[in-house]
Amino acid sequence: MFKDERNHSVLLFFFTIIFTMVLSYIPADTKVLNYQPKKIDLLMDIVPDSLLGYSRIDIKAGKEPLTANLFSGAMSREVIEALLTHTKTLPFWEMNSSEGVHGNSIPLSGNADQMNFFCEALKQVKNKKVRIADYGDSGNEGDFMTADIRERFQSEFGGNGVGMMAITSQDISFRITTKHSFSDNWKTVSVLTGKEGDIPIGINGFVSIPKGAAWVQYEARGGYKSSKYFTTAKVFYTNAKSSAIKYAFNNGGEKTATLQAGSGVKELVLTSSGNATSFRLTTAMADQAQFFGVSLESGNGVYIDNYPWRGNSGISFRDIPDFVKQDFQKHLDYKLIILSYGANMMTAGNINFTWYKNQMTKVIQELKTFFPQTSILLVGIGDRPVKRGSRFVTDPNVYKMIQCQKDIVAATGISFWNKFEAMGGENSMLDWVDANLASKDYGHLNDLGAKKMAGMVSDLLLNQCKK
């Protein structure tokens, strides 16, 4: 009897091996009951790359290599822990560029002349505010990279303050420029959760509604010179009741300010008697208004709003109502919109690049309609590895996504920056990880890597405007 059971176990083992190997021959686009299994290859570690068809030439020619196992776009615990260990270092323009990974100096492509809206505005910065909206996925969280670009521009052109911030946020525990806290009685609708009825989502992708006497507070952390203080807090909201909110600068005595009732995006400008390092807003009642966020500013100069949309592909701009885009442009007058998306589409398995191209083309065409005097820069995805057995290699879909993004740029007439080539090209993320510039999840830059990338982006923009 024992011998029979042992034979059954051996047979089950071999059956499992044979079944798994058979699965490796199933075409990548096969679906079973609307479920698409991931590719399996037990021999991946011992089969030569040449037999797998895994070469850069084949990938660029559009051939399908036999690899899969894509990373999730969500930020891992390891990344969050790395971000929480943030330590202040030299500004990126004072760092020794000869240390670690160099990267490549890649100029803008596409319609580089479309950047003229931004460049012309920059020439008048002494007499006005020049605003940039920096949109991205989880790579934008914590104000990483945006903070260093902001520091560079505000140091050179003026302006103080981090700009626009939402009422609630997912990255408060590791945001490097602002200590952001809020009560737990806010209802937030965002591009992360999807539309809800007729509640309008703001230009930052968020809107928050108090369930009672709710509060939010922003405190400058002081790690960046240009973000150490502000003098003005601009509150953006809509659909307010005839009522007043309370506010305070520098943890001082509370004052009251009246909200303007009615639809459309409203702006409440509150000014401190001197330099402020904190601002607190308190609502008076439930459903008092739908609050989009608060912008912390001081004087003319450059302001860069950090808009992180975790796990997003950029398609969610369609969830922002037209009147919100139109009204916010009147209030903020963006001169440059940066779009850093695409990486989260890589988690979809069998990616429909044609669908994504069409959707993002529509998104950008609509942005150009509501922001007609605004430069738009699409940043291509960086190197993104997959695990091939025990090794990491560039995901072959990276090349397809970059081509997809180039097609989007060609269809919309905007500018493009190839971050993949700027990082060093194929398998460059491994070099960034080895140089301690990226997390070992091989998907996110760390603090030093963000500073290096910020330097590359800042130089890119400034050099373009010097032409």
Image (spheres, helix red, strand yellow):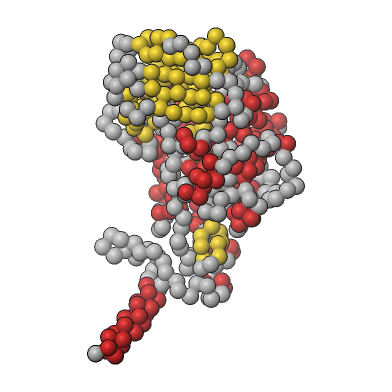
Give me the residue at 40% from left, 30% from top. 168
Horizontally, residue 33 falls left or right of residue 270, namely left
Residue 363 in sight in this render: no
Give me the residue at 40% from left, 27% from top. 182
Q: Residue furthest front?
A: 2
Rendering coords of residue 413 (x, y %): 53, 37
Q: Nearer the viewer, residue 18 or 400?
A: 18
Q: Which image quadrant is residue 156 in?
A: top right
Q: Nearer the viewer, residue 160 or 191?
A: 160
Residue 68 in sight in this render: yes
Rendering coords of residue 295 (x, y %): 49, 22
Give me the residue at 62% from left, 29% from top. 224
User: Can you say which quadrant of the picture contains the N terminus?
Assistant: bottom left
Rendering coords of residue 76 (x, y %): 47, 49
User: Can you say which quadrant of the picture contains the C terminus?
Assistant: top right
Whether residue 257 is situated above or below residue 450 in the rendered picture? above
Rendering coords of residue 373 (x, y %): 53, 25
Q: How many marks?
A: 0
Whether residue 41 is situated above or below residue 178 in the rendered picture? below
Give me the residue at 53% from left, 41% from top. 84
